Amino acid sequence: MNNQSSGPVLWSVAGFFVVIAFGVGIVSMAAFDSGPAGPAAGIAAASAPQTVNVELGDLYIKPGMIHASAGSVTFKVTNKGATEHNFSVEGLGATPMIPPGSSKSLTVQLETGTYKVICQVPGHAGAGMTAQLMVAEGEAPASDGPGAEKTMSAKQMALHDAKVTGSFPAETEGIGGTALEPRIVDGVKVFDLTASVIKWEVSPGEVKEAWAYNEMVPGPQINVDLGDRVRIVLHNELPEP
């Protein structure tokens, strides 16, 4: 399918556009229920049940990096989008479909390590509804109360940094973020973008499906100068509008 916009759109641009791929996640920290008051308030025991609040929207999961301790964890998932979504932890289970404005819970038993989290609606993970779940042993992030934002513990940070730095240098196939050259038509800079589904090597040997512009992640840069006349033509080859 190849749909072109019904007519050219013309802008006077003050600056430059940077067009990125669909699959950019939003990163923040997870929210945990606080424990009872007392000398140890704010530190959850590793064996105690934990509750993690997660928000789903149209094409995002928030937070993008979820933290928990090993043991029993209940994810309270709220859908703030306009369509149905669900919440799936790789290899462990998923919530039912959650209508807009509703919440569902998922309880799983977690071991230390990292897990992939997605929405299982076809096309949604490729469009950005993915997150990472990082599980550490014996430590839970401190809490100042329900809904408080969390940071990594020193141990969690060390484990995360070691995993990331140990992956370099990591050469993968594909390009991303390169400058898109325009066509000049009657003094107007015309940029052609094609949105399509591609195979993206996110790490050596690990290939994922991604929604991209011009078959690259991140998408191409559109660079223009003050006062330029610009037309952007979008060709849609995605399975959705």
Image (spheres, grey):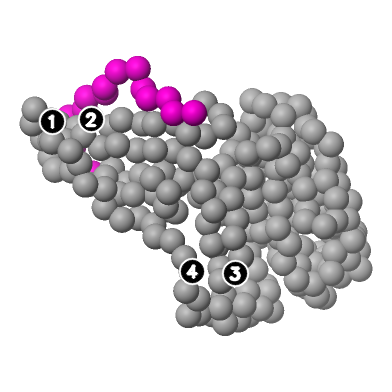
Residue 6 on the magenta segment:
yes
Q: Which residues are magenta?
A: 1-16
Label located before the other in sequence (2 or 3): 3
User: Would you say the magenta stretch is mainly helix, strand or loop?
Assistant: loop
Q: Is residue 63 above or below residue 83?
A: below
Between 126 and 51, the one lying in front of the other is 126
Q: Residue at x 32, y 46 (%)?
A: 18
Mark 4: amino acid: Thr
Disc 4 is placed on an element classified as loop
Of callouts 1 and 2, which one flags the residue occurring earlier in the amino acid sequence? 1
Q: Nearer the viewer, mark 2 or mark 4?
A: 4
Q: How many marks?
A: 4
Amino acid type of the residue that numbered disc 2 sits on in the rendered structure: Arg
Foreground residue, 209 or 223?
209
Where residue 169 sits in the image (x, y, percent)?
48, 80
Instruction: From the image, tell me which residue sits under label 4.
Output: 172
The kind of residue on which mark 3 rests is Gly
Q: Which mark is residue 235?
A: none
Q: Earlier in the sequence, mark 3 or mark 1?
A: 1
Observer-nearest of 237 and 24: 237
- Label located before the other in sequence (2 or 4): 4
Disc number placed over residue 185 in the picture, else none: 1
x then y, percent, for residue 133: 71, 60
Q: Residue furthest front?
A: 1
